Amino acid sequence: MVRLGFIIGLVALIGVLLSGAAAYRVYDQELTIDGIALARAIDIHASLVQDRLTERELLARVASGLFRAPSVMKANMLQPLRSSIYAFKTDFVVASWIARLQPNELESARAELASAGFPNPTIRDRDDKPLDTRSLDGPLDVVMDVEPRDAQTMAFAGRSVDRSPVLGPMLARAMAQGKPVASDPLPLLHPKGPAGLVLAAPVLQEGDASPAGFVTFSYELAPLMLTNDDLSLFSVVLKDPRSEDGELIADDRGNVTARTTSQDGPAPSMLRTVTFGDRDWSLAYYAKTNAVKRAQQTAAIVAAIGIALTSIVCGLFGYVAYSNLRLRREIEVRIGFERRLTAVIDELNHRVKNILAVIQSIVTRTLRHGSDIDVARELLIGRIHAMSNVVSLLSESQWQGVQLKGLFESRAIPHADRIAVTGPDIAISARAAQSLSLLFFELASHSDEGLSLVGKHPNIKAYWEVTGEGPEAVFHFRWEESNTSAATRRADSDFGIILLDRVAPEALGGTSKRYFTDMSYVYELSAPMETVIDMTERDRTEALSAPVRRVS
C-alpha cells in the first residue's frame, strides 16, 4: 500500500507539474497572440488614418494648384473649384478662400462681398467688430468665399483671421513653409461646435513668392482620426498637442471631449504617429480587454482541466491497482486456505486413524477378555461412549485440549455424582484426554459394581495436583474408593488392568500403581506435565484453527 501510494503521488505530482507547465505555456501564448492581434489591428487602424489624412492633404494641394492668376478680391474664387472639390472628397465641414489684402484694398473687398450677396460684407475682426483701416500698417487675411454657402458659413465672409490664436499662427506657418499646414484642434463653425482641424494650403501667384491667399478645409476630428469599430480590440485617443498630459477622445456619437491623464491611470497599450499638415500627431491605443487577466483566466481553465484529468488518471490507476492488489490478496488467501484445508484434512486423517485404532483396541480387548457377552456389550458401549464424549469435548474446543474436570461429567462416566473431584482445573491435550477418559470410565465402572463394607456404595475421591515448575512440573493423580476391599470389590478385567497399568502410563510417559488399604482401593498415576499438556500438539492445532493469513 505504501508503494502504491507513492506511485499515485508521483503520478499526481507529474500531472500537476505538466498542468502547470501547460497553463504557463497557454498564458504565454495567449499574451503573445493577443499582443500580435492588437498590434496588427492598431497598425491597420493607423494605416487607414494615415491614408485618410494623406488624401485630405492631397485635396488641399490640388485645390491650391488649380488657381491661375487669381484675383485676390474676388468673392467667388471657389466657384470654379466646386465640381473638382466635391468629386474628390465631400467630408469637409467648410472650405474657404482667405485672401491676403492690403489696407487700401479693403474697401474694394467689401464691395465685392456685398455684390456676391454675403449678409455682412464689412471687413471686421474675429470678434465680428469693424476694423479701423486707418490703424492698419500691413496686409490682412480676410475670408472672401466659403463652401458650402449657408446662413452659418456665409457669416464668416469679411472676417479677418490674423489675430485668431489658432488660425493666425497656422496661416503664418503655411506662408513661411509654402505648403499645407494643419491647425491645432478647435471648435468648428461656432464656439460650441464639433472639434476639428483646419488645413490651409497657400496659393501663389505666377512669378510671385508671396502667397496671394490660402485655401482652407475644415474637418471634424472624430471621423478624421478617432473613428473606430465598436467590436474592435481597442479604443483610440489623440494626444492633445496643446497639453502634455491631455487627450482627445470621441464617444459613440462622434462627440470629442478632452481629458487629462494621470500617473496612476492605465498606460496606453501602443502609440502610433501619423503625419498631417506638416505635423506629427500621436494616436494612443488602449486595449478594451485586459489581456493579462484574460490569459490568466485561460491558463487557470487549462490548469483546472489538467488537474481534473490528473485526478481521473490517478483515480483510475489507484482503482485498477487496488483491484489488482485485492485480487492478489484474495488469491493468496485462497492459496492459504487450500493449504490449511490440506493440513486440516491430513490432521483429521491422522486423528481419525488414532481414534479408530483406539476403538479397534477397545473392541478387540473387550471381546477377547469378556466372559459374559452381555457384560462385554455394556462395557464396550460405555467405553465407546467415553471416547465419544471426549471427542465431543475436543470438537467444542477445536481440538485445543479439554479441561480435566470435564472428563468427570455425567455423560462421560457412570455415577459421576458419587465422585468427589478435587484439583486445579488444567487443560490437557487431546491424546491425554483420550487416555484419561477411558481410565476414569474403567475405574468408575468397576467401583459401582462393588459393595461397601457397610452395605453402601463406595465413597470415591478423585484428586490431582501439579508439583514443580517449568520442564520439571509433574502431574499427580489419585483415585481412592473408600469402604471397599479386595474381598468386596470386583477384580479389574484384563482390559482394565492393561489400561491402568500399561496403556495410560505409557501414553502419558509416566508411571502408575494400584493397591488396597485396610478400608479403600487406591490408584495413583504420575506423569510429566509436558506430556499431559503436549504443547507440540496444541501449537499444531492452534495453527490449523487460526485465521488464514496472506501468503508472504
Image: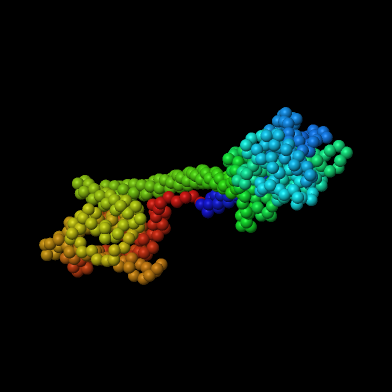
Towards the viewer: 522 or 429: 429
Towards the viewer: 141 or 64: 141
Towards the viewer: 295 or 88: 88
The residue at the far bottom in this view is 468
Q: Residue 391's x, y, as percent?
A: 30, 51
The residue at the far left in this view is 455
Identity of the residue drawn at 40% across and 51% down: 547
Q: Is residue 287 visible?
A: no
Left/right of residue 321 with respect to residue 508 in the rendered view: right
Identity of the residue drawn at 60% across and 38% down: 231
Q: Residue 196's x, y, as percent?
A: 66, 43
Q: How is the image coloured?
A: rainbow
Looking at the rendering, which quadrant does residue 48 occupy?
top right
Left/right of residue 12 with respect to residue 200 in the rendered view: left
Identity of the residue drawn at 75% across and 42% down: 107
Q: Residue 474's x, y, as percent?
A: 35, 67
Q: Is residue 123 visible?
A: yes
Left/right of residue 539 with respect to residue 190 in the rendered view: left
Decide: is 422 above or below 315.
below
Q: Residue 49's x, y, as percent?
A: 70, 40
The residue at the far right in this view is 207
Identity of the residue drawn at 79% across and 33% down: 66
Towards the viewer: 172 or 233: 172
Decide: is 438 above or below 123.
below
